[in-house]
Structure formats: C-alpha cells, structure tokens
Image: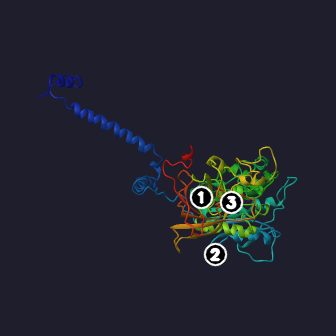
Amino acid sequence: MSSPRQHQLKRNFCPNVEGWCWLSLKGGAALVIFGWAFYVLFLTITTHPCWMASNCWASLVMGGSRRAHLAQTGKLLMPAVGTTGLENIVFGIASSADHWQKRKQYVEVWWKPGITRGFVWLDRPANFTSDPPIKVSEDTSRFKFTHPNAPRSALRLARIVLETFKLGLPNVKWFVMGDDDTVFVTENLVQVLNKYDHNQFYYIGSISECSEQNMAHSYNMAYGGGGFAISYPLAKVLAEILDGCIDRYSSLYGSDHRVQACLAEIGVPLTKEPGFHQIDLHGSLFGLLSSHPLVPLISVHHLDAMEPIFPRMTRTSGLKHLLKAARIDPGRVLQQSICYDQRRNWTVSVSWGYAIQIYNRIETPRILEYPMLTFWPWMYGKYPFMFNTRPVPKNRCDRPRVLFMKSVNFLNDNDTLGGIVSHYQTDDGIDSNQCNLSKNGNNVDRIAVFSEVQKHDLTLAPRRPCCDISYPGDNSNIDMRITIRSCRHRESVFQEYG
C-alpha cells in the first residue's frame, strides 16, 4: 500500500489522473535515464568519423582486442599502418658519370642486390655496369636556371622523382631519394616508413645540422644528401606539376630545394624524422655518433668530408663494420645507455654497436646527451649547430677512455630473436684518455656488452635503455661486463647520486 507521501508524489506527477499513475516513480526514472542514454549514444554514433566509413567500425572492434592484448602481455599490438617492406621502396640515387666510379663504394655498403629496388641516375651514358642499375637523365636544357653560383645539374637531379615515377614500376609505396655518397640503414628506413600511411601525401626527411645551411636554403626542406621519402600518391601529383614548377624557382640553389618548393605549392609540409642525417660537417663524427638521439639511424651523408668512423679503417670498411651491428639489431645501433660504477666513481656511456666511453668521474645524463665537439660546421657562424654540444677537454686525463666495437654476434647461432654480445676494445692510436682510470691502476681495455634484440614500437614514447655493470673474475678475457636492459618504471639512472 502506498504511503501518504508516495500518494502525494503520484498526484503531483499525474494531477489529472485518479487512482494509480500509469508511470510510477521508479518506472519514470528508468525511462528518463534510458532516454538520455539513447540520445547520447545516437549523437556519438552519428558524429563519429566512422559513421560513413565501411571499415572503421572494424578497427574500433580491433581496438578492444589490442587493449586486451596489452592487458594480458604488457605489449601493445599495433595495426600495420603502412605495411611497407623493402620491396615496396624504390630508390633514386643522384650521381654523375664522372663521380659514380668513385662514389659507388658507398652505395655498395648498403645495397642488397636482387632485393633493393632503384636506379642510379647519371648525366650521360657510361661504359660500365652497376648494381643498382644505371639510368640516364633526360635533357634539361629547356629549363631556366638563374642562380649565379649553383651547378645546373640541380635541375636534372630535381627531376629524378619524376623520371623514376614515369618508369611505372609495380608495387611501389614510397620513393626515396639520396646521393651517391649517402648510406642508408634500410631496416630502419622500412621501420620508420611503416609509421605512416603510404596512401596519404607524405614528404619525410630532415634538415641540416648547421644553422647557416638552413638559413641559406630552408628550415622546411628535406636535405637530399640525407635522403627523403615521398609517398606514391604524392609523387604522382608532384610528377604532374614538377616541370612547370621548376621554371618558377629557377633562382634556387639545389635540387632538394626545388622539390620542396613544388611540394609547398601542393600544400604538403615536411614531416621531420631526425634519423636522416645530412652531415653538413667536417672532422670526426665520433661526438655525434656516440650521443645519437633516441631515434633509429636511417642515413648518413657527406662521407668524403668526414674522417673514417672507426680507427685504423677506411671510410667504407668502417661503415661496413657499423652495418654489421645494424644488420643484427638495427633499432639499437648507436642508441645510448648510461650507467655508473659507484665503487670506482666512474660513468660509462654505451653507444651500442659503435663505442663505449668511460669517465673517471660522475657525469650527468644531461651532459652526456650533448655530442662532444669532435667536428666543425660546413660553414662557420655565430650559432653553427642545430643542437647543443660540449667541448673536448683540453687535459687528456679529463677525456673519456674510448673503446670501439670489435665484434658483434648472437649468443647462439641463428638466434635472431635472442641474446646478443658485442665486444669493445681500446685503441692506443686514438686521442682519448690513456691515463689510469682508478687509483690502483686497473684500466679497462676489453668490455663485453650483452643485450637482446630491441623490438621497437615507434608509436610508444622513447626512453633511453638502462644498463648494469659487473666485473668477471681474474680468469676472464674481459675487464668489464655491461648488460643493457629496459629501465624499470620509476628508475632513474642518476638517483644514487642525487
């Protein structure tokens, strides 16, 4: 039986109905809540981008399975955005008949015959065979060229994208341009391009390391020596307008600047990937390579202007040596790890696959992230570089002791998903710390670094890996053992010295 209070409420809601109200208080509340929920759901569905897309709701359902996979395994199952393989990339390599015989040694370092696709573009026919195969560029005498100091070959090189596209090759998703002295790490190039949808308009590369170069040319341009990638649909549109566009920019210096100007007319900006390296530098690349940013290494350029990257090796043999590490674990090559020996008060910085530096003092990660100034800019200026640097100490005993990679292998044969050991040794011929690193004179000359193949997910936030130091017994053939691992959630490598 209803209480007087309930009866009064019914009469307030149904003032013209005697007896029981057709909608009780409980039923009315439920109906109101259901109505609001249905209205919100209707707005959500009809305003969602998937409302008109045939395959979008399937992706939302997959999102649920991705979250379930993450909860079960701790690893994010990402959809294949670009699904790009090396077979989907066509390289256009800029060269000339006069330079190719000398420069092809750099391309041979990274080119995989029968697997890599692309062509070397020369200015005239040449009486030699090559892999990659050779193409001769079309005549460009009909185009205007008004820059007083630039070579006219910039016109020919700017059209490599067009002429490569006109070949009509099948199964192409990306066109990648580079110079004959550019070395690509193709495994990392494929990995980075897979972050992007090749069906959209993408122009991917990076700017120069030197401020003056960017000021003289453009901060919005992918430098051709470092290489750049253009998605197939964008290349198709660019090919339609390029010849007409080139004449409008007759006063520009380089081929890469002309390509960027034409892409600006299409409305496509540069998507910057710091792993492309123009290397507008002279001297030694040690400082830059030993403090590489936490991105995959994609390319290096201007190798004739730099010293060999490993001591007692030629330029090409040093590059081949580095690519041994890149073939085994491309995502980890040059990635920096920092750890401390508290007992000896040492700092150890590992540039995996390249070099290890040992400081006889405590250095903060903030300082070690800055490249040591072992190089100088392409052109001198007040603010020469696009990044912070640190000087090389004048006192030799303040410099780090440097050990270079000697070998890298899987711990077990054909263990492509397991452990890796890389060995590093000192070289008395280099200009580094030859002083004792401890009071008892125990120098470290041989280091073994243990790691696992790095499974990169470039959709996740980058984080520098951590490492641990241990010392084997007297009977061991190494002086120090370093284990590289993922950092714990709240771990700070410098917290012991905070």
Instruction: Give the labeled residue for mark 2.
Output: 114
- Residue 309: image x %, image y %? 72, 63
Earlier sequence position, callout 2 versus callout 1: 2
Instruction: Kindly give the residue lying farthest to the right in the view shown.
Output: 148
User: Quick one: SS at disc 3?
Assistant: strand
Residue 59: quarter of image: bottom left
- Residue 275: image x %, image y %? 65, 56
Of 58 and 191, nearer the camera is 191
Earlier sequence position, callout 1 versus callout 3: 1
- Residue 134: image x %, image y %? 74, 72
Residue 31 showing in the rendered view: yes
Observer-side mark, 1 or 3, equals 3
When the figure is inspected, residue 180 is found, relative to residue 460, above or below; the finding is below
Question: Is disc 2 surrounded by few (<14), some (14 to 19) or many (20+) residues within 10 Å?
Answer: few
Dividing the image into 4 quarters, which one contains the C terminus?
top right
User: Quick one: SS at disc 1?
Assistant: helix
Q: Is residue 13 left or right of residue 493?
A: left
Residue 16 showing in the rendered view: no
Instruction: Give the CA distance from mark 1 to mark 3.
Output: 31 Å
Instruction: Give the labeled residue for mark 1.
Output: 192
Observer-side mark, 2 or 1, equals 1
Q: Amino acid at mark 1?
A: Val
Instruction: Give the CA distance from mark 3 to mark 2.
Output: 38 Å
Of 211 and 492, nearer the camera is 492
Observer-side mark, 3 or 2, equals 3
Q: Amino acid at mark 3?
A: Val
Numbered marks: total: 3
When the figure is inspected, residue 135 is found, relative to residue 458, above or below; the finding is below
* Residue located at (41% from left, 45% from top): 45
Residue 9: quarter of image: top left
Q: Which mark is residue 402?
A: 3
